[in-house]
Image: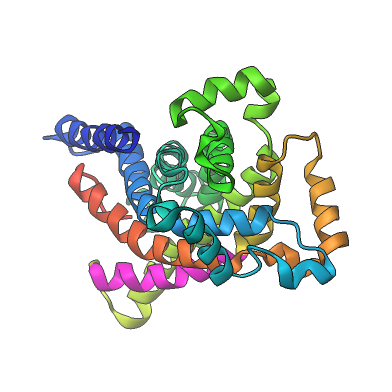
Amino acid sequence: MEVACTTFAIAASLSGSRLINKGKETPTLFSECVAGGAASAFTSALLNPMDVCKTRMQVEIMKGDKRSNAVHGSMLRSMRSVYNQGGFLGLWTPGLTATMVREMVNCSARTGLYVPVRNFIASTMGQGDDGGKEANLASRVAAALTTGTIGSVISNPVDVVKVRLLAAHPDTYRSTYAAYPELFRAEGTGGLFRGVVPSTLRGAFIACGELATYDQSKVEIKSRFGVQEGALLHVGASLITGVVATTLAAPFDLIKTRAMNAHSSASTLDIFRAALREESPRALLRGWVPAYLRLGPHALICLPLFEQMRAFVGADFI
């Protein structure tokens, strides 16, 4: 029921955005944000099993000789464990509503605001006023870091709930929407913003790896191979984006997940040091495979879908 209501609310927001923009030359900022959030929410719902396995791999501490006995020591082992606990639905449903809500909040800012912010920075830096077409790589990176930071900060409370529902049994909270006030009552503002530093760093670098990379890749593919706007260009740029985004975000993703799943006051630096001391530097890339199996297809589906959703609400391609 929660998933159905959330899906209906997102679809209604998209339809409303289309009606608002009807007959307007310039799309509203609201519609651009809705397009960004909706594209990511639907894509992340489809790929939720990868997020479940990645999260459980990251929260499991592996020390030296215990590595071979870890329940979630590899992608396949993690997937088998989750499946044995809850079957096919056990792979898909943990934290599904929280995933969609988190993406809607985070990517409405991170993805939806990217084009307006990029164009603003480009015009401020004297790179032309032609809708961002003259923006250089520096402008794209600056815009992505800015919107990624904003998205991560405002979505941190829903991200904490998402991580905990993905990491443990869904009965951690009575329901997804009841989890937010329960979290606040139990842990206060500190609980809502637990892990905000690594989460913000991760969000900024993912935005840079996704949006700036995708945007710049489109420019390079167009100029080098003469590919025009369309599915081929969007898919080609997305394939490059997935690898870059996963690698840039991996260390911050691990630290963020452990910080949010914890109920202690351990700092970001404490978690970082513990990972290096107890598990070696390769721990910082722990969960890279499931992360890529989520972020790679996520970029491949989400970014072309975002382009189409922008067109649906009356906006131009990125």
Q: Is residue 238 visible?
A: yes
- The correct choice, above or below, for 232 with respect to 148 in the image is below
The span shown in magenta is 231-247
Residue 198 or 182: which is nearer the viewer? 182
- The correct choice, above or below, for 297 with respect to 225 in the image is above
Q: Is the image coloured rainbow, by chain, by secondary structure, or in one colour?
A: rainbow
Q: Residue at x 40, y 65 (%)?
A: 297
Q: Is residue 136 visible?
A: no
- Furthest toward the top, the residue is 185
Residue 230 rendering spot, x and y as whole percentages: 23, 67
Q: Which quadrant of the structure image shows residue 238?
A: bottom left
In the visual, does 315 lie left or right of 206? left
Q: Residue at x 72, y 40 (%)?
A: 262
Residue 15 or 174: which is nearer the viewer? 174
Residue 92 rendering spot, x and y as whole percentages: 40, 53
Residue 151 or 266: which is nearer the viewer? 266
Q: Which quadrant of the structure image shows residue 26?
A: top left
The N terminus, quarter of image: top left
Q: Main secondary structure of the magenta part?
A: helix
- The correct choice, above or below, for 186 with respect to 224 in the image is above
Residue 4 rendering spot, x and y as whole percentages: 27, 37
